Image (cartoon, coloured by chain):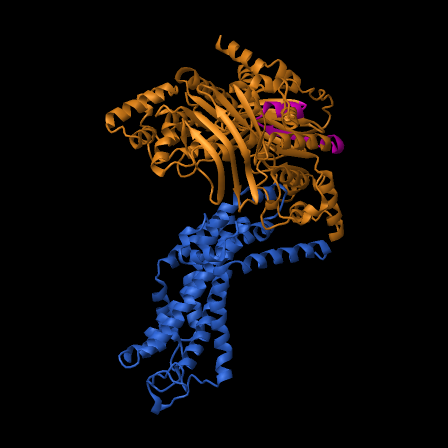
Amino acid sequence: MATTGINDTNSERRRTVAFRAMRNTQLIIGFGMIGGMAFAAVVLPHLLGLDPQAVEPLNRLKAPSLAHFLGTDNFGRDLAARILAGASTSLRLAASVTLLAAAIGVAVGILASFSRLLDHVLMRICDGLMAIPALLLALALTATFGPKFSNLLIALVIVFVPGIARLVRARALALRSETFVEAAVAMGASDLHIMGRHIFPNVLSVLAVQVTFLFAETIVIEAALSFLGAGVPPPAPSWGNILYDGKAAIAKAPYMVLFASTAMVMTVVGLTLIGDGLRDLVDPRSGSQPEASWSKRLLRLVLPCTKEGA
Amino acid sequence: MTLPLTIENLSISFGRGAIEAVRGVSLELRSGEILALVGESGSGKSLTARSILKIFPEGATVSGRISLTGEDVLAASPSDLARLRGAAAAMVFQEPSTALNPVFTIGWQIAEGLKAHGICDQRARRNRAIELLRDVDIPDPQTRVDYYPHQLSGGQKQRVVIAMALALRPALIIADEPTTALDVTVQAGILDLLRRCRDELGTSILIITHNLGVVADLADRVAVMYQGRIVEEAPSTVLFASPKADYTRRLLAAVPLLGQSSGKEDFASRERLILEADHLEITYPGRFGRTSVPAVKGVTFDIAAGEILGLVGESGSGKSTIGRAVVGLSPVTGGAMRLFGADLRHVKGKSLRELRRRTGFVFQDPASSFNGFMTVFDCIAEPLRVHRALPSAPAVRSRVLELLDQVQLPSDMAWRYPGELSGGQRQRVGLARALALNPEFIVADEPTSALDVSIQAKVLELFKTLQKELGFAALFISHDLAVVEEISHRVGVLRHGKLLELGSAREVMSAPRHDYTRLLINSVPVPDPAIQAEKRARSVA
């Protein structure tokens, strides 16, 4: 539709959503943390000429200094370079896993809510997959097919799709009995139209929140797999194998574990903040919440229970 | 002697005085008096009532003085407040099913209040609970005391809530829309009960309501609230006979009166039938071994082109189910229902879509019948797009603007979201959406029951005008007899899934043949204290 009116609306809606996003402290801080991390991972290594693979046997396990501002590891490699490269691996993997899992999960969930037969088939498959612990399945797959990025991706997507599908299905089933969906049925709309125009946008609110938490979970699981040696194969850097190397040298160089886990914790906290912020933003009913002062909003970050009914 | 309640110059505002919800309200309630606080949604009546127990929403700034049996409520300490709540004043809420906790027996819940106020002996509490249930006419109170809320009907639940309010013999009962969620026949019983509380126990009652019939039935004195102020206060006989404030006059004029509307002329032409129901049966299938639930049991009626048939009934009568069956939202399980000559039991796919194209549906709750992600424009344009009814985007656009004009909404509203509109505006959008494809038939399922009286009057007027202009036939479903009488050519009365009576609106309302119809008509409180008192005297005798 190319009428001017509709463009007006879209820009207006974008403006209000952007406006509300700017006032959402959690979202801003969360995006700042993740954006900063991604930016640093992409730009800094080039800018500072950092090479995560360069070995300096003379400078092993050195404390932070001007030359290596996060110190060096047990092979004398620059830790800052390795942590940044690890960030890029982790974020890329997590983004691919979440996008794929969300796309498949939404499709499966919405389809299941529209057909009784499909529902039974798809949900039994999901039940079966949910019975397998995520870490074990990923371990088994990478052990069988080799620790590669693509294998890790497939393993994690298989593990995460059932959860998303279940969530989307539950929401979609609830939506199907909403009056506006019945109104669409009563006006003769096709199932496809209802799925696309009514169910999908309204599923987004729960999905957005779930997806950010999934993103965080992927990062943690990837680190765990790499720590166990089933993730990103060394010498390629990842937070998991930095932690593993750091474990052996924890007495002599505790900063290896410290910096790698700080990076991970920061990322996960950032994602959690985004998730909470998105929940407030995407829910169309939360638009008219009274404006709180800066101090109150900061307080809410620490004490989520002070928030009025979500 | 101190009065049970005095409110002096109460003001409540939000957002540092940006929104003034209550502005300088002063009220007095004498012992044994029933005062009605009347107003439409947003008038501040509920806020005023709740402030008596010092219950405020977050962020409220309050000034003024409220004294309850001589004690200042707003200055009271938390422990004094706990004593006052329940003992000096008790509250009866609108929705009895949410006012009771579903996981405890009703006896336990009544006893809880007694325990909080120092009655320690368990047996004494239980006996008192049984006594209270007997007082509010719950049959067989010894057994019912151990019932859970879901085992009682809506009216019985409200009686239990009233029993809880009476538990500590408070001087004042605050009843916030106590009968709004109930059927008329049940409402009459609850109003009688409240009157008995006053007569036998001398309790003062502050009743908050938007229903002027209830006011006329119960109240000694009436205070009318509008935009946070009391615009008029008078004894109810005086207020109804000679309202002084403009707003009161408008309010009274907006109430549809039963048996007084000029009514529609009888509709003679029955040449082309739009909808025929022939021994229609609708049964909701039982799942997991539960028995199936019959909702409609053998109903026969028809609607001719251009005719409006009103269906009246209380909750659970099957009236909405019939409306939903027309567009296939409920299954037809027996008999036959023919829409434009096609049997709804057998149409599928394309032909069903075609039937839906020719039928519009207006839903009860305008708040939930729109997708919050779509603008008003997209909501109204949706049926046009779904059926590809118009060739181009500009054609859709001009049709939507024309529809907005028809339902008397300004065209710039097209770019707003439904959530930003008021209830009445949203229902107009609902009407525009139903009319988008020029349907020959419209199903309106309680289209005005979620609206204020004055808004309801305007929406009904609009519906009538549009019907005259466009000549569509309609199935108009409502629980409100006066509304149905005003709008319909013929009226059908439903009860427990059976059609008890079907005839012209005038016939059914003035000379009902069935006992239930008569009961229904008699239960509707008339907004005139004199007539209402007479009616009450007659029903007692």
Where is residue B238? Give x, y as percent. 59, 17
**To which quarter of the image does residue B475 belong?**
top right
State the extent of the magenta-drawn residues as a range: B467-489
The residue at the point 35 percent across, 89 percent down is A59
The residue at the point 35 percent across, 34 percent down is B80
Where is residue B201? Give x, y as percent. 39, 18
The chain coloured blue in the image: A
**To which quarter of the image does residue B332 belong?**
top right
Does residue B415 appear in the picture of this structure? yes
Q: Residue furthest front?
A: B1
Where is residue B443? Give x, y as percent. 63, 33
Give above or below for A74 relative to B342: below
Does residue A122 appear in the picture of this structure? no
Relative to A171, is A61 on the left or the right?
left
The chain coloured orange in the image: B
A115 or B469: nearer the eye? B469
